[in-house]
């Protein structure tokens, strides 16, 4: 297995899928000659030519609509959002068209398209460039939403997304692109809709996804030293949620903390908690606790920025709360 | 008014009578739809095409049946000209299972993929972007198919109109944008909200071929579209056409149209495209009154049958709620006429597989991009 950066794993998935299927093309800002704002598309223009790696004007709504239209008649577009913050301009095409075409046409049309790009706090970028927007998209029937934490999952999920017959929203970690990890070569597929137990444990379950996974790992290691065994479930897919995996880990540990980068109100974690309370209430030894980004806009100042986001100490405090060991 | 001098018609009788049949069918269908709305059989929004028939009929005669087409929410009539089953369109308006979308879409979302009608869209102007993508796909696959996209005058003030025109010209996409300018965006006269109310002139900003067409005259419409379609099909890029037309009815069935005078509507009705074509054909002595009467009787029967079909079609099963949201693995697309009428539908889009397809298009040739970079003093 090769050790690859998250961005390289994505690049590999794109190159392999474009090799396999000439219907796949990539469109977005700076994806071609600039080689990608985050270098995910490095080298692809030379390999596949200008009809398949397309430098789009800064018209998010326009090129997203173009992608959806191309998918309606058999192509398999990958639309790169330079960041998901900018994709807010394109939401009409994603939500009102891509997610609803199959329904409005009574099953006549399908829309196999991937919208992908980085989400979450970028680091000292203030409020317009630091948003975890996955809950917005997870809200809509007709979409699938994935948010991988590791390079291996990034590759395997992107390959699944490109082969999927439905619109897939892929929220990559803006702070994860340079992160390294083992990635299987060639045909490595991670199915959409399947969560992954990234760490086995028996005392408490941390349920999370994307970059927050690493804070959970950090917390788990520290808690291990205190004799607390933590299980980490990485959801990987946020729509459809892997209910079975959520319930399985709760049945095992009887305590859960749900960690997400985004805001608390109507966050994906709220739905996870609802699944637990409605289907595993009797398994619980303590109320489920959520760790989320603070319910405020992201600030530029370093200390404020840090205070807003979840981190290992906040997760550790939450774990102790569900173990009734506060102050310990 | 055309005609006047008794010169031989440049048009075949067959084409003229087909245009007449299409326009008359649209008119009768929409009149019945309005009536059924009044009876409570149709609910929600219901936007009638009455007055604008020359546009759709002229376009249909001038393009190929396999060209792609999409529209906004005033979308009952164009598919009828494409050959959609009037009963199944009416059933869709009724919210019944016999509709093209099983009653899930309703008036604003008619889709008939068998006849290459890719939908009616309810968000003003959103189909403009989709049309560019469909045209992009044709170019990508090296097909000579064009995409015709209808939208209303008010859609030209949406961002997507400008964003898409820019890309369509830059990449020479084979798409014909037809702005059906019926002079009102809902209840607001277009000039009240537009710095340049002659929509087609906005093509200038993007170096796009643009022109106005007489949308109340089916033959002029036909000529304009024929010429534009040939230009687009030859690979010259997109065209923005403004079809000047008028709706005789309100924006939707819920609109009494108090923002315009009775006199204005009366004046416009004098331009009714349907008697106009009939007069032309009669003057050319290509057909007699009886032939028109025969068409009208046939269409009337057809529309009566459509209403009856819709009325008798059951409501969709509740189990349908859970279908057609996500495509499950191995799931085929629904072919409406096969599903509803039990006929074999063979004509269905089929695309080359990823290994068969050879993409030969060089969207931005290397030398061209290098040259542009050099001119800008950039080094890559």
Image (cartoon, coloured by chain):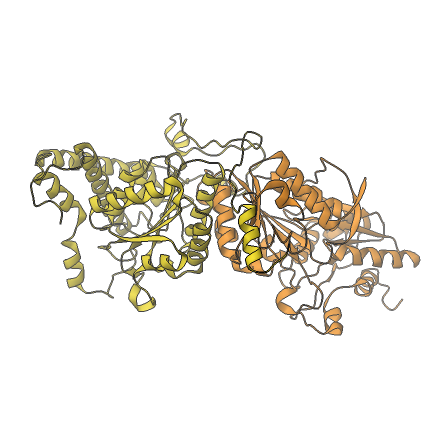
Chain colours: A orange, B yellow
- In the rendered image, residue A238, in percent from the top left (x then y), is placed at 65, 50
Question: Residue A190's image quarter?
Answer: top right
What residue sits 36% from the left and 58% below the top?
Answer: B204
What residue sits 20% from the left and 41% below the top?
Answer: B24
Does the rendering let one see residue B30?
Answer: no
Pick the front one: A69 or A304: A69
- In the rendered image, residue A99, in percent from the top left (x then y), is placed at 52, 48
Question: Residue B295's image quarter?
Answer: top left
- In the rendered image, residue A24, in percent from the top left (x then y), is placed at 58, 40
Pick the front one: B55 or A263: B55
Pick the front one: B219 or A207: B219
Image: A38 above or below B335: below
Residue B222 horizontal side relative to residue B9, left or right: right
Image: B192 above or below B86: below
Does the rendering let one see residue B72?
Answer: yes
- In the rendered image, residue A111, in percent from the top left (x then y), is placed at 52, 42
Quadrant holding the C terminus of chain B: bottom right
**Total count of labels:** 0
């Amino acid at each position: 297995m090769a050790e690859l950066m998250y961005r390289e794993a994505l690049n590999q998935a794109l190159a392999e899928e474009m090799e396999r299927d000439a219907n796949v093309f990539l469109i977005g800002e700076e994806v071609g000659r600039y080689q990608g704002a985050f270098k995910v598309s490095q080298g692809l223009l030379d390999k596949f030519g200008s009809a398949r790696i397309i430098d789009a004007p800064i018209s998010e709504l326009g090129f997203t609509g173009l992608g959806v239209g191309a998918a309606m008649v058999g192509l398999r577009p990958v639309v790169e959002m330079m960041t998901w913050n900018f994709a807010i301009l394109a939401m009409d095409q994603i939500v009102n068209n891509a997610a609803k075409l199959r329904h409005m046409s009574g099953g006549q049309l399908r829309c196999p398209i991937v919208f992908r790009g980085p989400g979450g706090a970028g680091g000292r970028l203030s409020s317009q460039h630091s948003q975890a927007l996955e809950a917005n998209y997870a809200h809509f029937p007709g979409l699938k939403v994935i948010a991988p934490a590791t390079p291996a999952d990034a590759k395997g999920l992107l390959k699944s997304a490109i082969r999927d017959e439905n619109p897939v929203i892929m929220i990559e970690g803006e702070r994860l692109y340079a992160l390294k990890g083992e990635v299987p070569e060639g045909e490595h597929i991670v199915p959409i809709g399947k969560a992954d137990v990234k760490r086995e444990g028996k005392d408490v379950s941390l349920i999370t996804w994307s970059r927050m996974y690493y804070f959970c790992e950090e917390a788990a290691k520290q808690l291990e030293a205190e004799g607390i065994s933590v299980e980490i479930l990485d959801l990987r897919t946020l729509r459809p949620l892997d209910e079975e995996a959520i319930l399985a880990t709760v049945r095992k540990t009887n305590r859960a903390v749900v960690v997400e980068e985004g805001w608390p109100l109507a966050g994906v974690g709220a739905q996870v908690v609802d699944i637990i309370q409605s289907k595993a209430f009797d398994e619980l030894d303590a109320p489920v606790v959520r760790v989320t980004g603070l319910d405020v806009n992201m600030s530029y100042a370093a200390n404020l920025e840090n205070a807003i986001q979840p981190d290992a100490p906040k997760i550790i405090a939450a774990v102790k709360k569900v173990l009734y060991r506060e102050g310990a | 008014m055309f005609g006047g001098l008794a010169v031989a018609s440049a048009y075949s009788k067959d084409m003229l009578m087909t245009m007449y049949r299409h326009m008359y069918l649209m008119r009768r269908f929409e009149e019945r739809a309005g009536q059924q709305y009044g009876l409570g059989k149709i609910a929600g929004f219901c936007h009638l095409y009455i007055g604008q028939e020359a546009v759709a009929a002229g376009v249909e005669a001038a393009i190929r049946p396999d060209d792609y087409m999409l529209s906004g929410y005033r979308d009952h009539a164009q598919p009828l000209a494409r050959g959609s089953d009037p009963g199944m369109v009416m059933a869709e308006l009724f919210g019944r299972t016999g509709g093209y979308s099983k009653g899930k879409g309703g008036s604003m979302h008619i889709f008939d993929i068998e006849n290459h009608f890719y939908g009616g869209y309810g968000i003003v102007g959103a189909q403009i972007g989709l049309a560019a993508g469909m045209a992009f796909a044709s170019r990508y696959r090296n097909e000579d198919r064009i995409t015709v996209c209808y939208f209303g005058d008010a859609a030209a003030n949406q961002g997507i109109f400008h964003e898409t025109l820019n890309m369509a010209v830059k990449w020479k996409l084979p798409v014909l944008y037809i702005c059906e300018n019926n002079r009102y965006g809902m209840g607001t006269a277009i000039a009240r909200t537009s710095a340049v109310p002659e929509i087609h002139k906005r093509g200038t900003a993007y170096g796009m071929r643009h022109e106005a067409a007489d949308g109340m005259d089916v033959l002029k419409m036909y000529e304009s579209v024929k010429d534009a379609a040939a230009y687009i099909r030859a690979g010259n890029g997109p065209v923005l056409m403004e079809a000047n037309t008028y709706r005789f009815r309100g924006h939707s069935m819920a609109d009494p149209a108090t923002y315009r005078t009775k006199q204005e509507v009366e004046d416009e009705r004098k331009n009714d495209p349907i008697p106009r074509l009939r007069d032309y054909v009669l003057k050319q002595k290509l057909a007699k009154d009886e032939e028109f009467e025969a068409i009208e009787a046939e269409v009337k029967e057809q529309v009566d049958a459509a209403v009856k079909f819709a009325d008798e079609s059951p409501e969709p099963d509740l189990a349908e709620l859970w279908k057609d949201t996500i495509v499950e693995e191995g799931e085929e697309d629904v072919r409406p006429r096969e599903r509803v009428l039990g006929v074999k539908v063979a004509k269905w889009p089929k695309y080359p597989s990823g290994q068969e397809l050879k993409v030969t298009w060089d969207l931005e040739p290397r030398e061209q991009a290098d040259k542009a970079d050099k001119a800008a003093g950039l080094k890559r």
